[in-house]
């Protein structure tokens, strides 16, 4: 409970989490970028970097457990750490999704682009914005913002539905696109999952501030 | 719950116990009042017979065969000087002994012997101290029947009491103070000197003052070593002697008398009127003793508060 | 501080040249102080032994311990010490019988019942009783206690002018403050929480005082009583003047007795020529008293110590 | 310090003689303020002991010095002990004031009362006395008074007899007075001086030494008709008189004897008859300048 | 989401004093305590539930001990102490004139900070209160029952004659609890009962408290927040707002709520060590 | 740290977790059952029940946080609780996947079955077995078992690949199946994810015992 | 996966005593302590690192205080105490014959369980040690520096003449720390320095310890495991295997490891309260 030590360590852990979030954002962006530009190298980098994200998660989690062990935090302090613990899991999985996108880039590398990627980057953009906002909400303990972001998940879901339907039509119309289309569905799925995970973070923010866990977004998948 | 209300009232056994408790208060108070009233009665009796003789003359006159002219002057000087000698010779030794026992002595059989011996010495009759003083100070050291010999004799007599009181006082200084000092790199003596002693002083003083009250009233031992009853000068160094070590020393080597001897001499006198002198002497002595006790009490209460 | 050179540190921790001697000088002086009381005892024993040796040249140990009469100054002389011992015991017994209950009751009152301010006033007043010169008590015993108290109460023919009881009563007054004051200190030192524990169990004030505080302070109380006994046994003037000077084996406190100290005072301040057997008897009695009190003190020391260990 | 200019005289000894010597010292101070006279009273025995140890210059005594004591003096090289008698202490026998039968007792009766194994009841002393137990009070057994009584009464009648020990003894005449006054069966004796003052509450008994009953009084003691009076002494050393003419001891003794008659009476004792006094003065005569 | 948000905020603004819905042993109404003219605590209204452990926490000097001691009239023993307001015990005002404090204390036992066994044998320690109160039953039974309840029987059953002072600190404290139980009280007050004990002994006492609460109502003052969290069902947080001011009740409610989601910022600050 | 209280509460929390695991297992089984038998009712029940699973998760999480707050556990005790915290998240997501399967059942309800469902039930079976084993490993703190189960994830992955390829061929060969096939891919994906989450649980078991977090299974998606 | 598993198991079997790799202040080799013929602790080998907080934890009676007090020869003061093995301080054996214990204590300061300021003014308290040790500098400077280091200056700078006893418990303890610092020690030993303090004062002392460790080496005995966890860099766990047996070192290592993944079951049992 030595506040100065505790606060330093809590700040450290939160900083770690933000750094990790930055890494994940980068991975998503790079993944989608690679998809757009069919940049295999970039995709490979994203895949390789995922290990770092994973490591960062474990490092942060270790720190959180140490912090709980050594400092026995209570009330909002404890919730803050538990939040970090959960958010890092989410971030790590978001990283995995980004990696998934990058892997699909590799699979698609040799094939012609199906159609200009408009919706996918749009989804990625929204997801990225949501993430940005979620972290902002976390930093400022801003539940209103968090709740707004959760609402934005619907946009992503809509885009996803739309894209999915489009790709289905592609596949039906043009048998040769089936493989590629399913790949793209994966990408969209990954992005949808990412946005979904962002809502998890937002839920955490609300929990952090209000001390109650609210399942504010019900995922459909 | 009204029944609960009723049950909380003292009833039956509790009421009886409370009654006994309240009655006992008056019994205990009675015992206390008894002690105090004896003192009151003694005081009353003494004042009744001696007050008429109390006057400035009584304090400033020399002894005389005329009761109304007789005074306590040399006895008062004698008592004062004797007590000073006693205090200055016994206290350092007593405190030294107490410090040795509590702080430096190896915890072995010797220490047990020293402790038992001190307790035993406290109960040795004063007349034996008188004989000892006569043998050692008057004879062996050739001090003659002087203030010094008397003072030293009384010092020997009160050392055991003072040591025991001082030991108690030193023991009551929390060990943490001593440990605190030692842990700062103080030597054993520095710890004692700066941290133990200053905090034991009030306790030591109380014990000492009580011992002195005893010495003030001592008669037998001083008669044994030749304390005089008739003296026509002021025993001890007088003002002028303070400037001159030789004179001061000579003053300490003078013969002496003390108030209790004077009182005793008067009580022995066949003439009735001297009984009043004795009572007046007792009043003077008791006033002094009371003042000392008051001082002790003040010191102690101050000490307790901390 | 970084790791210091071990050589340096060894050097640095060396005993200081000028630090130590001062310390040993002080220890020496203190030891000397402690030696004073031992030397005092040796001197006392020396004087007593030397002088009583001449006594025992004339009087056999057998007579001293086996004869029943103490009559050193009358013809036919006899030196049976027990009459004096019995006198001392009787006076002590009655003094304690009176002083212990009253003293302890006073202590209980002061520590458990009295308002702190009352205690502050009463205690020093009581303690003043310890400072009254014993000559005063002695005359008070003879005049007031015997004449105005005992004789009217029990009948002049029952009560000897010099009697053990009057001396005991004044001895009791004399030691009252010793018992009351030291016991009160002991009771005041009983931790407050012991008292609270008892109150918390629903005990009344009396129950707390008698069943908790008193037993907890017992070692201090016993110490007080021991000290009081030492004072009674060693007291001279009161017994010499009030108890009479008739050595006898009696249990009747209304009769006069002679105590060991009473005899010593009688001889010490009397006209007996030094060197005579009757004078040297003073030392034999002194020796006896010394041995008795020593035995008593040794016993008390170990008793109290055992007792203390049990309850700490 | 102003001590020692005229010299110092340390005196110890008998508490009986103390008032006389103290009175002399008091008046002596008026004429010789430069001489310090200190008077203590640790008893005749104690006084003579320190005297023989050379620690005092003069010793009061209520009995003559004993051979043992002289020997002790000699051991310390004090061979020139000088005895001077300064007065008489008449010994008074007293009974409880309510006692109406014992008005006069013979030496033999006193002997019977105070000897070991003597009368237990008044009736055993004289058939006309009531059959009541006798309670005895006498001075401390090693006081000069006691010694004198033993000599003058007990041994006088029967050399083999002893003073009995089953009474109450006290050093302190006050105490004896209280005792005798408080006990209806009492008889006791102590110094006349004390009786004079405290004696109103007691009844003095006349003594018949063979020449009829004589009541104790100054006059009867002074003229020798009262059989129980003892001499009081002071002891000093010839050498302390001889040393030099202006020495304080000589001045003090001269003053003592010059004023003895008045001062002894004043403190309650019996002054010496004129001839006896002259004998004493003659003892210091040789040293006077 | 607005309704939700206001709901959440209203949680924050909810009354921090939640009197338990259960049966109450003590009902304090506007209680204040004065020492001479020092106002130690004021305006405390508090219901203490039956068969629950209620913990009083708060910084030093906020009046926890004062409040505790006013529940069994122990502060009658402090000459300068004065209680105002009403303290009802099972509906009876314990400060009513007709009430005998000795009677109150018999029903409401107390255990102190420093283990304070009497310097007597274990047996005599336990029996003391029972005997002065004339509780029936043989000493042996009383002792055995109380020691068993205090989970001490097995450790001492062969040494009942041993002095209570020869036990270890934790055992001494359990002996003190046994002593209190032997009087057959209804409530046990504990003033920092473990603060002089090592962690292992502390755990034992805490276990014991959880055991005892099945039969007794327990009120415990503790400085150790972990302890309050571990051991109590309800927690009351007191605070003397500023140094020298009188203590008041800041928050009161179920322990898990107070320690995980305190409703008052000051409570949160205190339990997370943000204070001072 | 009062052990008895602590242990009771810890046991409670773990029991909650096992109950939740049971609910999830049930949901998976029922979901696949509904798929096989095209039982819309059953699928609806699965969907409805997911809310309970979610609630259970939050309840358990609350209990864990309370336990950490009130009992300040250390070392293995703390790890056990943190494990529960993470495992319940995984379980909840597994429940979501089961719900996802059930939703697909609803979507497929009106269409003819594509082919006899063999591989999918097989996957479900393996996933279920893995889950059973993982809980066993958790209960017994059996790291060896946990590691074996992690290895079994490869079986699931293989089945998935196989099924995916098969369905791709279906789609290419028969355009009408595309919609249904993608649905079935979703089902398979859900099952794959479930198995993947089981490996998370196993990782936790290893962490619990050994105090180190090992990322023992690298998911490809 | 077999290699991995064995790796994991080997972690479990790894040496529970991890001497720190840093520079050491104390190097204890097979240290044992006897009180008369009671063997209090035995076979302790321990290196204590420079500029770190090392905590000694363990159940009551395991010998923590004994071990601590043997580091500055405070147990010379217990007549029956005897130390065996070697205790090296910066390479010098402090139990060598030529060593003056007073010198040792000057370099190795100590702070006790109960705050024990001397009943003197704050100033005199601080200056005492410096003066007996002949430290140079004006009193004013010494006092100011020490009090500032002990984070007490601001609170008392206007009352330096006030008695140390008039301070609150936590301030008193900081005064004792200041007093120790004024002697310019190298190491500070603390024997349960917060066990008499309330949580807020405790926090302040803990903060201070973290501050002081930048300049001093600190060894702290504590019963409070949370405190050891919060405040120390290294933790040594001592245990007297059974009651009455001598204490030994069970585990020693970085605090975070000891509290999150103890290598010894007994350590784990102790810190999780499974003991006794
Ligand atoms: N006997 C008393 N006389 C005067 N004031 C008192 C007395 N007892 C307590 N106080 C004061 O009342 C206030 C509350 O004290 P109390 O002992 O109840 O606090 P506490 O919360 O128990 O503190 P702690 O945690 O230190 O035990 C304090 O300011 C204290 O100084
Ligand atoms: N002066 C002493 N004489 C005899 N034995 C002692 C002495 N001091 C300590 N011991 C014993 O040595 C062992 C270790 O005691 P120590 O005080 O070092 O333990 P500790 O770990 O500090 O305990 P605590 O946590 O209770 O302070 C104990 O068994 C104790 O009884
Ligand atoms: Mg308190
Ligand atoms: Mg310790
Ligand atoms: O004191 P005296 O020798 O005269 O009895």
Image (cartoon, coloured by chain):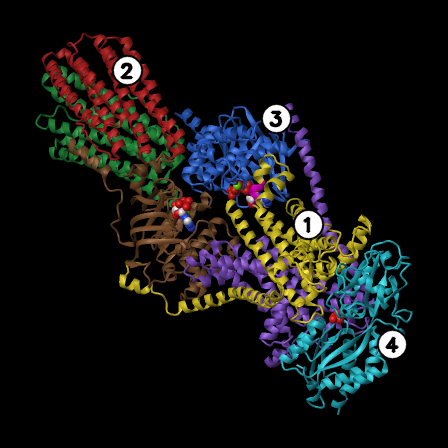
Chain colours: A green, B purple, C yellow, D cyan, E blue, F red, G brown
Q: CA distance from mark 4 to mark 3?
A: 100 Å
Q: Are marks 4 and 3 in contact (CB under 8 Å)?
A: no
Q: CA distance from mark 1 to mark 3?
A: 39 Å
Give the number of the disc on residue F26: 2
Q: Is residue D84 above or below residue G24?
A: below
Instruction: Find residue C159 and report its horizontal and vertical position in percent.
Output: 79, 52
| Most foreground residue, G258 or B57 | B57
Judged from the image, the secondary structure of the residue bearing numbered disc 4 is helix
Mark 3 residue crowding within 10 angstroms, few (<14) / some (14–19) / many (20+): some
Residue A163 is one of the magenta-drawn residues: no
Judged from the image, the secondary structure of the residue bearing numbered disc 3 is loop
Instruction: Find residue B243 and report its horizontal and vertical position in percent.
Output: 61, 80
Q: Chain of mark 2?
A: F
Q: Is residue E67 left or right of residue E199?
A: right
Q: Which residues are magenta?
A: C191-195
Mark 1 residue crowding within 10 angstroms, few (<14) / some (14–19) / many (20+): few
Q: Is residue B287 left or right of residue F136?
A: right
Q: Is residue C234 above or below residue G237?
A: below
**Where's the N terminus of chain C, which quadrant?**
bottom left
Which residue reaches farthest left? Answer: A110
| Most foreground residue, B164 or E176 | B164
Q: CA distance from mark 2 to mark 3?
A: 54 Å
What residue is pinned by disc 3?
E91
Mark 2 residue crowding within 10 angstroms, few (<14) / some (14–19) / many (20+): some
What residue is pinned by disc 4?
D222
Q: Chain of mark 4?
A: D
Q: Is residue A65 above or below residue G254?
A: above
What residue is pinned by disc 1?
C118
């Amino acid at each position: 409970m030595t506040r100065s030590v505790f606060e330093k360590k809590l700040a450290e852990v939160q900083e770690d989490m933000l750094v990790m979030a930055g890494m994940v954002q980068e991975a998503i962006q790079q993944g989608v970028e690679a998809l757009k530009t069919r940049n295999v190298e970039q995709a490979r980098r994203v895949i390789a970097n995922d290990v770092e994200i994973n490591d960062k998660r474990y490092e942060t989690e270790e720190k959180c457990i140490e912090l709980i062990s050594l400092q026995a935090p209570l009330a909002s302090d404890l919730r803050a750490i538990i939040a970090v613990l959960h958010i890092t899991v989410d971030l790590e999985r978001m990283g995995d999704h980004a990696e998934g996108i990058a892997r699909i880039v590799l699979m698609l590398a040799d094939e012609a682009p199906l159609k200009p990627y408009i919706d996918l980057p749009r989804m990625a953009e929204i997801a990225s914005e949501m993430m940005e906002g979620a972290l902002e909400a976390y930093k400022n303990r801003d539940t209103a913002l968090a709740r707004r972001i959760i609402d934005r998940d619907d946009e992503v879901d809509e885009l996803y539905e739309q894209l999915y339907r489009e790709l289905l039509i592609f596949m039906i119309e043009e048998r040769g696109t089936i493989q590629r289309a399913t790949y793209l569905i994966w990408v969209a799925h990954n992005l949808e999952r990412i946005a979904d995970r962002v809502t998890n973070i937002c839920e955490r923010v609300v929990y952090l501030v209000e001390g109650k866990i609210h399942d504010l977004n019900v995922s459909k998948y | 719950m009204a029944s609960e209300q009723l049950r909380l009232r003292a009833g039956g056994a509790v009421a009886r116990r409370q009654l006994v408790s309240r009655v006992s208060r008056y019994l205990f108070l009675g015992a206390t009042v008894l002690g105090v009233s004896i003192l009151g009665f003694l005081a009353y009796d003494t004042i009744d017979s001696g007050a008429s003789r109390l006057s400035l003359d009584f304090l400033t006159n020399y002894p005389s065969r005329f009761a109304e002219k007789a005074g306590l002057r040399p006895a008062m000087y004698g008592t004062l000087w004797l007590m000073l000698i006693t205090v200055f010779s016994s206290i350092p030794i007593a405190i030294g002994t107490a410090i040795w026992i509590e702080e430096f002595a190896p915890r072995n059989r010797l220490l047990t012997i020293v402790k038992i011996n001190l307790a035993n010495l406290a109960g040795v009759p004063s007349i034996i101290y008188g004989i000892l003083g006569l043998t050692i100070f008057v004879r062996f050291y050739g001090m003659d029947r002087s203030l010094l010999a008397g003072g030293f004799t009384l010092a020997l007599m009160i050392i055991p009491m003072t040591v025991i009181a001082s030991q108690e006082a030193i023991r009551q200084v929390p060990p943490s103070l001593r440990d605190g000092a030692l842990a700062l790199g103080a030597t054993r003596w520095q710890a004692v000197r700066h941290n133990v002693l200053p905090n034991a002083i009030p306790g030591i003083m109380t014990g000492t003052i009580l011992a002195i009250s005893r010495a003030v009233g001592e008669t037998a031992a001083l008669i044994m070593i030749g304390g005089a009853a008739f003296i026509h000068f002021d025993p001890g160094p007088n003002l002028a002697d303070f400037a001159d070590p030789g004179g001061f020393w000579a003053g300490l080597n003078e013969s002496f008398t003390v108030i209790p001897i004077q009182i005793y001499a008067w009580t022995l006198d066949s003439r009735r009127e001297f009984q009043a002198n004795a009572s007046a002497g007792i009043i003077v002595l008791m006033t002094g003793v009371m003042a000392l006790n008051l001082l002790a009490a003040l010191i102690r209460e101050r000490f307790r508060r901390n | 501080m970084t790791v210091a050179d071990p050589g340096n540190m060894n050097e640095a921790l060396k005993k200081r040249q000028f630090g130590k001697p001062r310390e040993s000088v002080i220890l020496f002086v203190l030891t000397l102080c402690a030696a004073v009381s031992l030397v005092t005892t040796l001197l006392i024993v020396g004087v007593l032994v030397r002088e009583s040796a001449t006594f025992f040249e004339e009087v056999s140990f057998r007579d001293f311990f086996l004869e029943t009469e103490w009559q050193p100054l009358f013809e036919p002389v006899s030196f049976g010490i027990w009459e004096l011992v019995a006198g001392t015991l009787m006076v002590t017994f009655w003094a304690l019988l009176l002083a212990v209950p009253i003293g302890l009751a006073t202590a209980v009152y002061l520590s458990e019942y009295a308002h702190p301010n009352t205690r502050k006033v009463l205690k020093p007043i009581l303690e003043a009783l310890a400072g009254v010169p014993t000559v005063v008590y002695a005359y008070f015993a003879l005049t007031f206690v015997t004449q105005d108290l005992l004789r009217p109460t029990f009948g002049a023919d029952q009560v000897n002018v010099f009697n053990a009881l009057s001396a005991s009563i004044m001895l009791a007054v004399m030691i009252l403050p010793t018992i009351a004051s030291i016991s009160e200190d002991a009771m005041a030192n009983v931790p407050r929480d012991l008292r609270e524990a008892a109150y918390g169990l629903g005990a009344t004030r009396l129950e707390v005082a008698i069943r908790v505080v008193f037993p907890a302070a017992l070692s201090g109380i016993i110490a007080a009583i021991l000290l009081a006994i030492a004072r009674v046994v060693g007291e001279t003037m009161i017994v010499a003047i009030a108890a009479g000077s008739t050595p006898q084996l009696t249990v009747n406190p209304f009769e006069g007795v002679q105590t060991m100290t009473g005899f010593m005072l009688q001889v010490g301040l009397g006209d007996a020529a030094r060197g005579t057997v009757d004078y040297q008897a003073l030392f034999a009695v002194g020796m006896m008293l010394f041995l008795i009190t020593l035995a008593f003190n040794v016993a008390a020391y170990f008793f109290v110590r055992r007792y203390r260990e049990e309850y700490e | 310090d102003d001590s020692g200019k005229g010299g110092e005289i340390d005196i110890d000894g008998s508490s009986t003689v103390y008032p006389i010597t103290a009175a002399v010292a008091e008046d002596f101070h008026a004429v010789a303020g430069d001489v310090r006279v200190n008077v203590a009273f640790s008893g005749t025995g104690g006084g003579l002991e320190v005297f023989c140890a050379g620690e005092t210059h003069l010793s009061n005594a209520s009995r003559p010095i004993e051979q043992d004591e002289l020997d002790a003096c000699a051991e310390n090289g004090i061979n020139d002990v000088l005895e001077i008698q300064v007065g008489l202490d008449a010994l008074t026998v007293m009974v409880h004031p309510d006692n109406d039968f014992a008005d006069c007792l013979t030496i033999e009766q006193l002997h019977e009362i105070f000897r070991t194994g003597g009368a237990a009841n008044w009736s055993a002393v004289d058939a006309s006395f009531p059959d009541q137990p006798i309670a005895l009070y006498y001075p401390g057994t090693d006081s000069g008074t006691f010694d004198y009584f033993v000599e003058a009464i007990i041994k006088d009648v029967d050399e083999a007899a002893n003073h009995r020990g089953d009474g109450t003894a006290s050093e302190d005449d006050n105490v004896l007075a209280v005792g005798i006054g408080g006990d209806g069966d009492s008889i006791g004796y102590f110094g006349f001086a004390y009786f004079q003052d405290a004696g109103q509450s007691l009844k003095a008994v006349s003594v018949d030494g063979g020449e009829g009953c004589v009541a104790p009084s100054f006059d009867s003691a002074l003229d020798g008709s009262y059989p129980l009076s003892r001499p009081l002494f002071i002891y000093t050393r010839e050498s302390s008189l001889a040393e030099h003419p202006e020495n304080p001891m000589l001045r003090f003794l001269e003053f003592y004897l010059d004023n003895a008659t008045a001062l002894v009476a004043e403190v309650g004792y019996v002054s010496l008859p004129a001839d006896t006094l002259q004998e004493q003065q003659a003892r210091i005569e040789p040293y006077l300048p | 989401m607005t309704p939700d948000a206001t709901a959440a905020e209203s949680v924050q603004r909810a009354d921090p004093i939640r009197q338990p819905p259960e049966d109450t042993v003590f009902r304090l109404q506007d209680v204040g305590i004065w020492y001479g003219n020092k106002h130690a605590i004021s305006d405390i209204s508090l219901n203490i539930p039956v068969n629950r452990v209620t913990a009083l926490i708060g910084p030093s000097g906020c009046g926890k001990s004062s409040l505790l001691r006013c529940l069994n009239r122990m502060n009658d023993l402090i000459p300068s102490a004065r209680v105002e307001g009403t303290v009802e015990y099972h509906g009876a005002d314990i400060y009513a004139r007709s009430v005998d404090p000795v009677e109150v204390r018999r029903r409401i036992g107390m255990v102190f900070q420093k283990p304070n066994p009497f310097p007597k044998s274990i047996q005599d320690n336990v029996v003391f209160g029972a005997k002065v109160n004339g509780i029936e039953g043989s000493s042996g039974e009383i002792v055995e029952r109380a020691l068993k309840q205090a989970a001490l029987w097995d450790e001492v059953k062969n040494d009942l004659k041993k002095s209570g002072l020869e036990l270890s600190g934790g055992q001494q404290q359990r002996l003190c609890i046994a002593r209190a139980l032997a009087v057959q009280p209804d409530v046990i007050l504990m003033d920092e009962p473990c603060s002089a004990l090592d962690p292992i002994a502390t755990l034992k006492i805490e276990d014991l408290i959880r055991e005892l609460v099945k039969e007794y109502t327990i009120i415990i003052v503790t400085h150790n927040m972990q302890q309050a969290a571990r051991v109590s069902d309800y927690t009351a947080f007191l605070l003397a707002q500023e140094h020298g001011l009188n203590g008041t009740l800041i928050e009161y409610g179920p322990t898990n709520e107070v320690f995980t989601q305190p409703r008052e910022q000051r409570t949160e600050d205190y339990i997370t060590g943000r204070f001072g």
